[in-house]
Image (cartoon, rainbow, N blue to C red):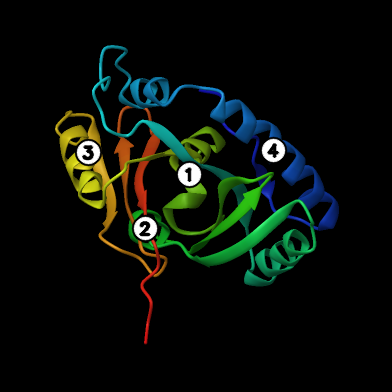
Amino acid sequence: MQYFPHREFLSGTSDAVRFVEDLREYANRMHSIQPSHHLSEFLDCSACGHNNPASRIDHIAVYAGDYQLDEDFEAWLGSLRHLCALSNLRMGPSYIAPREYGTQGYWISADLAMAAVEIFAIKRSGTWQQFAPAKKAARMSHVALAVDHRSQVLQVITDLSRYPQIRVLSYSPEDELSHTYGHLLNENTNRVLEIVHVGLPSICS
């Protein structure tokens, strides 16, 4: 798999413009690949996963790069907010980075040319700073496959985690956006796969 060309360190506005151009090209390329092929490539097994209910791509996730100071990330995020190509931009803290890599990080969710993308940036600290660039890309850049029913998320990640090389990184029954999702890690290849069901937000009275 050819991963997204992330930056060693995030920088200013010119970097953000080129980043979005690269992101559009990469997302288009990933969307052109059949979900069954993404699944087989993740499992590293061409005969696996053909009857899996995750039959379409929900979003493409990429690793943008490291940052050294919170101010560096905030400045780069500000540059992204000013780009018309990205819409519905939201962000929050990474839950996996502190637990798995001893550092902090952020996710950014946005729409790019009517397609959903997710962007990650991680602070160069903890065990993360010891990883080679290829390992960073593999651990963060991934495809999210969608299922039709909320209960299928747990079903799929449970089924896939039976493979000896697959470990469950996370499972969220329902987040603040009413999404149910789980992340899986292939420990032999460092590849990650997400399974997601996108629900409707609850209406509060």
Gap between marks 3 and 4 measured at Cα: 29 Å
Relative vertical location of residue 166 with respect to residue 112 in this rendering, above or below: above
Residue found 62% across the figure and 49% down from its top? 65
Secondary structure of the residue carrying numbered label 3? helix
Secondary structure of the residue carrying numbered label 4? helix
Secondary structure of the residue carrying numbered label 1? helix
Q: Is residue 123 visible?
A: no
Residue identifier under label 3: 156
Q: Position of residue 177 (x, y in %)?
A: 42, 66
Residue identifier under label 2: 199
Q: Nearer the viewer, mark 1 or mark 2?
A: 2
Q: Are marks 2 and 4 in contact (CB under 8 Å)?
A: no
* Three-letter amino acid code of the residue under disc 3: Val
Q: Are marks 2 and 3 in contact (CB under 8 Å)?
A: no
Q: Residues within 10 Å of mark 4 (few under 14, many from 20)?
A: some
Q: Please tell me in which quadrant of the rendered image residue 91 appears.
A: bottom right
Q: Nearer the viewer, mark 3 or mark 1?
A: 3
